[in-house]
Image: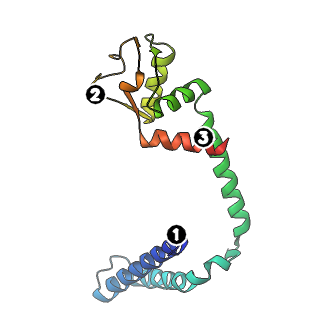
Amino acid sequence: MKFKQKQWSAVFVCIACIEAALLYKLIAGEAQTNQTELIIAICIVGVLFMLLPKLDSLSSVKLGSFKAELKDLKKKTADNEQTLSGFIILSMGPDTYLNLKKLADEDFGEYVKEPHMGLETELYYLRNLGYIFLNTEKARSIYEIPEKGDQLSDYIKVTEEGRKYIELRNNIR
């Protein structure tokens, strides 16, 4: 089964569950809202349920005076996604990114970590973003990492989020 089919199957199951829950509330009389509102909700979900197979061929949606062309909405969404990805990429300078990549390779090599400067501030920044974490067997804080050493990767590991950022940045550029 393709991923898209799995998605639609999940949507179908969710809508069916919502419909069943609404019907149960109506029949059991457990609805705290007015029954007319509940019947309208059931009808809306039912209509969505019937439209589900035709959703891929849908080109526009009109509700009263509101009309949306789905092609335009998809383009705007794609443009916004691209812009957002660009902002994410711009949130980190080239030196910090290079250090994150070296840490991800788990072979950073020799380092000099001056207090409150360069590498140390980059490590705090990357940690605050959730892209790296400390090997607490070696140091309990970034401050405790020795100022000089042969392998920074002994102290710092890259998180899954950090690896995703690297992948995103590689795919965008």
User: Could you say which quadrant of the image residue 173 lies in?
Assistant: top right
User: Up-down: is 82 above or below 143?
Assistant: below
User: Could you say which quadrant of the image residue 26 lies in?
Assistant: bottom left
Q: In this view, does 132 lie to the left or right of 71?
A: left
User: Up-down: is 112 above or below 78?
Assistant: above
Mark 2 sits on what residue? 136
Local SS, label 1: helix
Q: In this view, does 77 lie to the left or right of 136?
A: right
Kindly report the distance in space between the C-alpha atoms of the residues bearing marks 2 and 3.
28 Å
Q: Which of marks 1 and 2 is nearer the N terminus?
A: 1
Amino acid at dot 2: Thr
Local SS, label 3: helix
Residue at 45% over, 10% down: 114
Where is residue 1 drawn, in percent x and y? 49, 76
Mark 3 sits on what residue? 169
Where is residue 149 drawn, in percent x and y? 40, 14
Mark 1 sits on what residue? 3
User: Up-down: is 18 above or below 152?
Assistant: below
Q: Which of 115 and 111 is in front in this view?
A: 111
Kindly report the distance in space between the C-alpha atoms of the residues bearing marks 1 and 2.
39 Å
Circle 1 packing at 10 Å, graded few (<14), some (14-19), many (20+), is: few
Circle 3 packing at 10 Å, graded few (<14), some (14-19), many (20+), is: some
Q: Earlier in the sequence, mark 2 or mark 3?
A: 2
Where is residue 37 drawn, in percent x and y? 44, 80
Number of marks present in the image shown? 3
Kindly report the distance in space between the C-alpha atoms of the residues bearing marks 3 and 1.
25 Å
User: Could you say which quadrant of the image residue 92 lies in?
Assistant: top right
Amino acid at dot 3: Arg
Q: Earlier in the sequence, mark 3 or mark 1?
A: 1
